[in-house]
């Protein structure tokens, strides 16, 4: 059984160690980290996946802006090397994106391998520019609401009003959006919880950081 839960402060050292293990040294020197410096994570969407209490995978999200519009920056996501290729990355991707939709986010951005992220609906964003040096072929986007990326173009910038993110979370809670832990029997089947519309809640690769 796998358990997916929002990351807590107690999880943080383990999550950082997992990222250090899975990514090249100096990962935080990447330009994408400058979009995150001093900006709170989207706490409801930062998730840890454990099997028998042992951390297997983690994903984090930050708020950013493109053309002044709110955008979710997905990443880093990492699966422990001993558990890669078992569908856990996909499980975390699908579960976190389902939560993002419940929270009211419309568009997601990541920097990563298109051959992996395509399976979740991500496609190249021709007119969205990450801080250099970023290969434009790796700048990928997903619409959580139809048309959310249409006409949204330009530089990706830091979120300067994190209060807006908190307001979205408050509103989701007032609507009773379920953002708690889920238990999952296998990467393809969610057993303990279902979305309001009957979809299985949780359902897997890696974004640059
Ligand atoms: C990338 C990562 C999150 C994927 O998670 P995972 O649990 O191993 O992947 P899943 O089991 O969900 O999916 C496996 C599938 O994804 C493919 N895949 C994994 N990483 C891939 C990549 N970087 N590019 C293309 N395909 C990839 C596998 O070949 C496999 O394909 P298949 O379903 O056709 O057999 C994980 O492997 C990881 O943490 N890797 C270390 C960090 C890394 O390499 N990042 C790449 C930077 S973008």
Image (cartoon, rainbow, N blue to C red):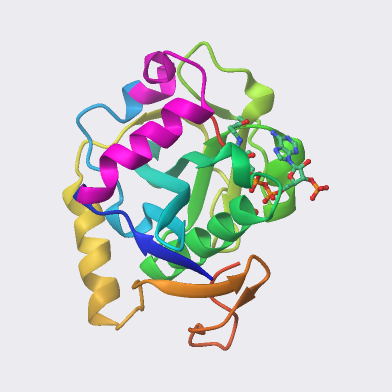
Q: Is residue 171 above or below residue 64?
A: below
Image x and y of residue 95, in percent = 52, 64
Looking at the picture, does residue 15 appear above or below residue 113?
Answer: below
Q: Nearer the viewer, residue 21 or 44?
A: 21
Residue at left offset 65%, top offset 44%: 84
For the question of whether residue 67 can be seen, the reply is no
Front-most of 199 and 182?
182
Side of 57 where 137 appears, left or right: right
Q: Residue at x 55, y 70 (%)?
A: 202
Q: Which residues are magenta?
A: 10-33
Q: Residue at position x 49%, y 84% from top?
A: 192
Magenta stretch: dominant SS? Answer: helix
Above/below status of 12 relative to 27: below
Q: Which residue extends farthest right? A: 115
Picture quadrant of ligand 1: top right
Residue 14, given in percent of the width and then of the height, sits at 33, 41
Residue 122: tell me if it is visible. Answer: yes
- Percent across and percent down for residue 91 are 59, 60
In which quarter of the view is residue 187 placed? bottom right
| Residue 15 vs residue 140, the one in the foreground | 15
Q: In the rendering, at what x and y percent does residue 101 appear?
A: 47, 66
Is 53 magenta? The answer is: no
Residue 61: quadrant of the picture: top left
Question: Looking at the image, is 114 positioned above or below residue 94?
Answer: above
């Amino acid at each position: 059984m796998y358990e997916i839960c929002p990351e807590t402060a107690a999880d943080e050292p383990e999550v950082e160690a997992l990222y250090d293990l899975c990514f090249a040294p100096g990962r935080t020197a990447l330009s994408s980290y400058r979009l995150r410096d001093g900006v709170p994570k989207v706490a409801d969407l930062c998730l840890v996946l454990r099997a028998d209490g042992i951390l297997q995978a983690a994903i984090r999200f930050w708020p950013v802006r493109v053309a002044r519009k709110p955008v979710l920056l997905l990443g880093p996501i990492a699966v422990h090397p001993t558990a890669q290729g078992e569908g856990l990355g996909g499980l975390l991707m699908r579960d976190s994106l389902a939560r993002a939709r419940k929270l009211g986010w419309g568009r997601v951005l990541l920097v990563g391998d298109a051959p992996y992220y395509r399976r979740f609906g991500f496609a190249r964003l021709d007119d969205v520019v990450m801080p250099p040096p970023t290969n434009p072929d790796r700048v990928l986007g997903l619409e959580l609401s139809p048309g959310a990326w249409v006409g949204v173009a330009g530089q990706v910038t830091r979120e300067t009003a994190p209060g807006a993110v908190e307001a979205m979370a408050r509103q989701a809670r007032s609507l009773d959006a379920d953002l708690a832990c889920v238990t999952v029997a296998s990467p393809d089947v969610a057993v303990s919880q279902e979305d309001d519309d009957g979809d299985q809640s949780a359902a897997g690769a890696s974004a640059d950081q």
